[in-house]
Image (cartoon, grey):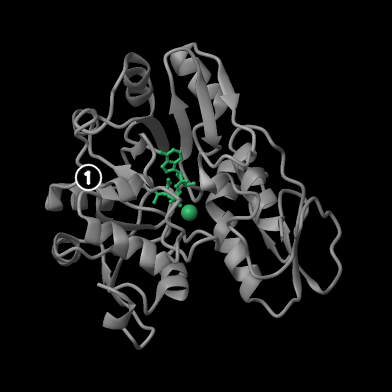
Amino acid sequence: MDASSNPQNTVATQPYGKAGIEAAAAIILAGGCVAMPTETVYGLAADSTNPAGVAAIYAAKGRPDFNPLIVHVTAVAMAQTLVAWNAVADRLAAAFWPGPLTMVLPRLRDCRVTQAASAGLPTLALRCPAHPAMRDLIIATGKPLAAPSANRSGAISPTTAAHVAASLGGAIPLILDGGPCTAGIESTIVRVEAAVLTILRPGPVTAEMLASATSLPVQIAANSAEITAPGMLASHYAPDKALALNISVASPDHFHIGFGAIAGDMNLSASGDLAEAAAQLFAALHTADASDRTSIAIAPIPETGIGAAIVDRLRRAAHW
Ligand code: TXA
Ligand code: MG
């Protein structure tokens, strides 16, 4: 499927359920891609072993071909058919799969995932999602599914079907609507090596959680010219409007996103709960971007626990 198959800029939406999964599986097995919920953000899923499906994802998102995709599996056994699995990965899977943790491991020599899905890298990023929609679709197709976030490349990630329609309407044939995503922020990406873990993208599984599950040192990758995860690019997840961080008192031309005691025009979590704030973050940025204000300001967010992932996304969203 390509954009020309849906020239009206509209997109069919079906509720997540048996009929929706059957329709989505048929599109994917024909080499197309479908938007669907996961527990983190909505993904744009295609058969990672089919070059046509992978190409459809890159085309719909306008994604640069050097930016590799995450491949989704239902279980460790499926992962072991794709990458060189190891004991550390076993411990991480036992602690965090299914869930919002993506592991980067060496591709097996005969890995059936297309080279294009991992952008020619010798490694593959694998995640075992908890959301039943993605799990059902992997089972219905029998394929490991490549799925980036279902937004135009570089834009804010979607946490509702409406966000997907606004960003990719006209470019994809189907959205499965499973309601709002519960975690609301993309998975933690960790490079798994025998003696050290390296966080390539902070997320719901924190450095402390990784360290306590493995007893290994956990380092945070620095931004560098060498792209190990283009989600690490300084500018990413960006709204159209300028975004100012750490603002306690905003001027009237700002849409003010509050947190805790700082009310704002909309509050990520009045009780100061960081998990709730993560779940609300992208919806708040979408709302602020669509508002009549000229720019966006956001209250200070503590960088503890999942707050580190929230602040990571905000810094990239604010970088022009
Ligand atoms: O929560 C999530 O991870 C969501 C849902 C849909 O699963 N997916 C997601 O995908 O956020 P995406 O494409 O928006 O972000 C994937 C990130 C990119 O920054 C990409 O560069 C990185 O994963 N990545 C993929 N393969 C990699 C690899 N082999 N080595 C390092 N980074 C990789
Ligand atoms: Mg993304």
- Residue 178 visible in image: no
- The residue lying at 34 percent from left, 38 percent from top is 127
Q: Which one is nearer the viewer's eye here, 288 or 60?
A: 60
For label 1, the SS is loop
264 lies above or below 294:
above
- Residue 3 visible in image: yes
Q: Which one is nearer the viewer's eye here, 99 or 240?
A: 240
- The residue lying at 22 percent from left, 45 percent from top is 144
Q: Give the percent coordinates (x, y) of residue 87.
A: 33, 14
Q: Is mark 1 within 8 Å of ligand 1?
A: no
Q: Give the percent coordinates (x, y) of residue 137.
A: 20, 53
142 lies above or below 251:
above
- The residue lying at 47 percent from left, 61 percent from top is 158
Q: Which one is nearer the viewer's eye here, 225 or 77?
A: 225
* Quadrant of residue 94 within the rendered picture: top left
Q: Which residue is mark 1?
A: 144
Q: Give the percent coordinates (x, y) of residue 231.
A: 54, 48
Badge count: 1
* Quadrant of residue 265 within the rendered picture: bottom right
Q: Give the percent coordinates (x, y) of residue 48.
A: 25, 50
The N terminus: image quadrant: bottom left
Question: Amino acid type of disc 1?
Answer: Pro
Is residue 60 left or right of 34 when viewed as pictured? right
Is residue 303 left or right of 82 when viewed as pictured? right
Mark 1, Cα crowd under 10 Å, few <14 / some 14-19 / many 20+, is: many
- The residue lying at 63 percent from left, 38 percent from top is 224
The C terminus: image quadrant: bottom right
Residue at the extreme bottom of the image, as rendered: 8
